[in-house]
Amino acid sequence: MNPDGTLNTAVIVKLEPDFSEGNVSYNADGTLNRAETKNILGPHSAVASTAALYSKVKYGSRVSVATMGPPIAEAALQQSQLICDADELHLYSDRIFAGADTLATAEVLKAGIKKMANGQPIDIVFAGHRASDGETGQTGPQTAWKLGYPFIGNVIDYDVDIKRGYVKVQRLIKSYGYHDIIEEIEAPLPIFMTLDPSFIPFFNTISQRLKLARHQKEAIGRSSQYKEYLKVFSAQSLEVNSKAVGLPGSPTIVYKVEKIPRAKANRKADVIDGSSQGNIGQVVTRIYDTLGGTIIK
Amino acid sequence: MTSPLSSISQTKIKENQETFIDDTRKENEKEIEENYRHLYIVIEQEEGTILPVSFEMLGEARRLIDDFNKRYKPEEKVVAIILGHNIRHLCKELIYYGADIVICADHPELRYNRNLLYTKIISQIVTDRTCAEKITSSIHPVSTATTTPASLNPIFSKPRYMFFSADDTGRHLSSTVMAELESGLASDINKLVINDLEIRHEHKTKGKPIVYEKTLEMYRPDFSGFLWTTILCLDNLNPDNKKKFHPQACSIIPGVFSRIERDTTREEKIIDFDPNISQEDLKIKIINRRIVQSKVDFNNKKTIVSFGRGIKESPEQNIKLIENLAKELDAEIGVSLPISKKPYPVSENLTSTYMIPDRVIGTSGRKVNPLLYFALGISGAVQHIAGMKESEFVISINQDIQAPIIDESDILIKGKIEEVLPLLINEIKKHKDKLQIPQGIEQ
C-alpha cells in the first residue's frame, strides 16, 4: 500500500496470436500460421486488465502493467492500458530472456513486480487464466510463489477491505467427475489472483459509473501516448541472475515437435452426400433409431 | 570427412568428447541414483470422492513403473499422496488401483484444497527422509531389520517423477509445488514414455552429446490439436551452469489414460504423515463453499449439437440453423475450443450465449456421452475427440471427408453446414409430422 493508503495493483499480460475469425490463419495441415496471424493482447490478459480497472474505479488503486517479450510486446501493454487506465507500463525485454519456460519467465516477472510503483509493495497482482497459445496456465501461480504471495485462481469476484488489509474472493472450481463449486475465501493482502474467463465487473453505484467513465476517457488519452508511461528493463536493470532466466534458467526443453499421428479409427463412418434430400431422410431415420423411444416435443 | 586428415581430427574430438561424456554421465547417474527416486502422484479428492483423473494417473503410473522395473535397477515405486480430512479409508482404494504406497496427510485444516497450505504440505512430503526410508524399507524389508536405516538407505532428496491432474486445482498446485522444488513442469500431457536419450543442447550439455537415463518424455498436444510437443525436464550438466532439475513433473489431461482393473489382493502400505502447519498459513480462510449447477446442461440431454470453426462462412445464419436443430431435437449446444477463444462478430446475444467456456467440449471443457452427438464444422482435434468419443452415435457435417472427425463419426454428411442443416431440419419436421398423424385422425 502507498503511504496515503491507496492500493498498488499490478497486471501481468501477454501478447498472443489473435484467434478471432478473419485474423487467425491456419496452415493446410491445421497448424497455426504464425507469420500470417496478427498478435494482440490475449483475451485472458484483457480479463485481468478489467479486474485492475475494477480496483481502480472502486478503490482508486494505482495500476502497473507488465509483460515479458520482444519490443513488439509493447502492443499488449498499450492495449491493456486502454482497458485499465494504467499508471505505469513495464516491458521486460532482453535477448537472454528468450526461450524461457514458465519457471524462468516467473523469475523475470518476480524481479519486475518488485520494481513497480517506485519500489512500493504491490498489494494485488492480477493475471489471466492461461495464455491462448501456450495454454500452460503455470506462469501466474509460479510468479506468485516466487514473490511469496498466496495464489488464488479462477476468481470470479473480489472485494477489498482496505482498513483491515483483507480481500474477500469468490472463485469457481471445475473438475471432471465432480460438481462445480463456488468457494468464498478471505485472505490478508498481498495476494496474487488469476481471473476466471467468466469474470465480469459490476459497477453498481452512480459514483462508480462516473469514475468508470472518467477512467475510460483518461485511458484513451494515456494509451495514445503510452510511451510516456513505458519503462523498458533488461536483465541487468532488473538485476536478475542471468543463469536463472531464459534458456539457461529453464528446467524444461522442447525435445521435438511432430504432427500428431492419426489415431486408429474408432468408428467406420458412412459418408453421405449432403445435397440429397433422400440421403438426409435416411439420416433422420437413423437419428430416431438411436434416440429410440425418446419423445421429442 | 573422407580425407585422412579430417578423419584423424574427428577421432580426436570423439575421444575427448567421450571422456567428458563418461565423467559427466557417471557423476550424474550416481547422484541421481542416490537422490531422486520413485514416481509420486498427487491425488485429487473432493469431500471424500476420489476424482476419476486420480485413478487414471495411477493406471498410467503403474504401467510406466512396471516397465521401468523390468529395465532398470534398483526397483522404484508408485507413491500416491493424498491430503484431506477423514480420508484414511480412501487409501486402500488407491492401492487397489495401482499405488504401491500411499502417503496420507489427514488433518481438519486440510479438508479443502488451499493452494498455499497444500503446496507446503506436498513439498514437505516429497522431501521427507522418513517417508523415503519407509518406502525403501518396503523394498528391502530384511536388511532394514538388521541394520540402521540411515546407514542403508540412499540419500533421498526429491522424487524422480511427479504427476498432477491438469484440471484447475492440479494445474495451480503443480505450478506452485514445482516453483517450491525448483524443477520443471510440463502441462496437459496425453502420452508418456521413459527412455535413455542422447541429448546435445547448447545450455544443458554445452553442445556435447550426453545420455540422460530414465528420462520422462512428456507429450503435449498444442492448442491446435495437430502438433505434439515433447517436453523434457533435464538437469543442467553444462559445467558453466550446473543445476539439478528433479522431479521431472507434469500435469495429466483428465480422461486420457485408462485405469487398471481394481485388485483388492494388492498389499496395503500406508504411511501416515503428520503435517507441519504454521498459523500464518491459516490466515487464508475458506468462508463458504457451495455446489453450483452450470446453466449449460450436458448431462440430462440425450442429444448434443456442437459446432466449430466450420461455421465461419456464414456464422450468423449457421448459428440460427444450429439453434433450430437443437430445438427440434431438444438438444444442448456445445462448441469446440477455438470457438470460445474469441467471439465471432455476431450479435451481442449470440456471443454471450454460445461463445463461453462453459460450452466447450473437450480437454479444456467438458467430457460428454450423449446418445446422439452432432459435430458441425469440427475438424476433430485430439482435445475435442477426448471430450466426445464416448457418445453413442456420432453424426458430423464437414466439407472435408479427410478431416480426423471421420474416425469418430458413424455418419459423415459431406457438405456445407448452411446447405445441409435446412434439409436436415426439414426432414426431422416431416418425421415428427408422420408420428403425429394418428393423433390428428382421432381429432
Image (spheres, helix red, strand yellow):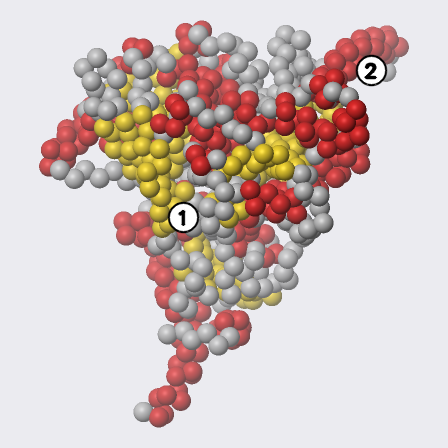
Label 1 sits on a secondary structure element that is strand
Q: Is residue B71 visible?
A: yes
Label 2 sits on a secondary structure element that is loop
Q: Residues within 10 Å of mark 2 (few under 14, many from 20)?
A: few
| Viewer-nearest residue: B192 or A158 | A158
Q: Position of residue B45 (x, y in %)?
A: 51, 43
Q: Is residue B344 left or right of residue A290?
A: left
Mark 1–mark 2 Cα distance, whole angstroms, equals 64 Å
Q: Residues within 10 Å of mark 1 (few under 14, many from 20)?
A: some
Label 1–label 2 contact, CB within 8 A: no
Q: Residue at horizontal 46%, vertical 64%? A: B303
- Parent chain of label 1: A
Q: Which quadrant of the view contains residue B288?
A: top left
Q: How many marks?
A: 2
Q: Which residue is mark 2?
A: B1
| Viewer-nearest residue: B3 or A68 | A68
Q: Which residue is mark 1?
A: A180
Q: Which quadrant would the N terminus of chain B be assigned to in this image?
A: top right
| Viewer-nearest residue: A176 or B208 | A176
- Parent chain of label 2: B
Q: Residue at horizontal 36%, vertical 44%? A: B289
Vertical order, B373 against B285 (above or below) = below
Q: Position of residue B196 (x, y in %)?
A: 75, 28
Q: Is residue A54 left or right of residue A19?
A: left
Q: Position of residue B376 (x, y in %)?
A: 47, 57
| Viewer-nearest residue: B244 or B47 | B47
Say what amino acid the circle numbered 1 marks.
Asp
Q: Which mark is residue B87?
A: none
Vertical order, A274 against A3 (above or below) = below
Q: Residue at horizontal 63%, vertical 38%? A: B270
Say what amino acid the circle numbered 2 marks.
Met
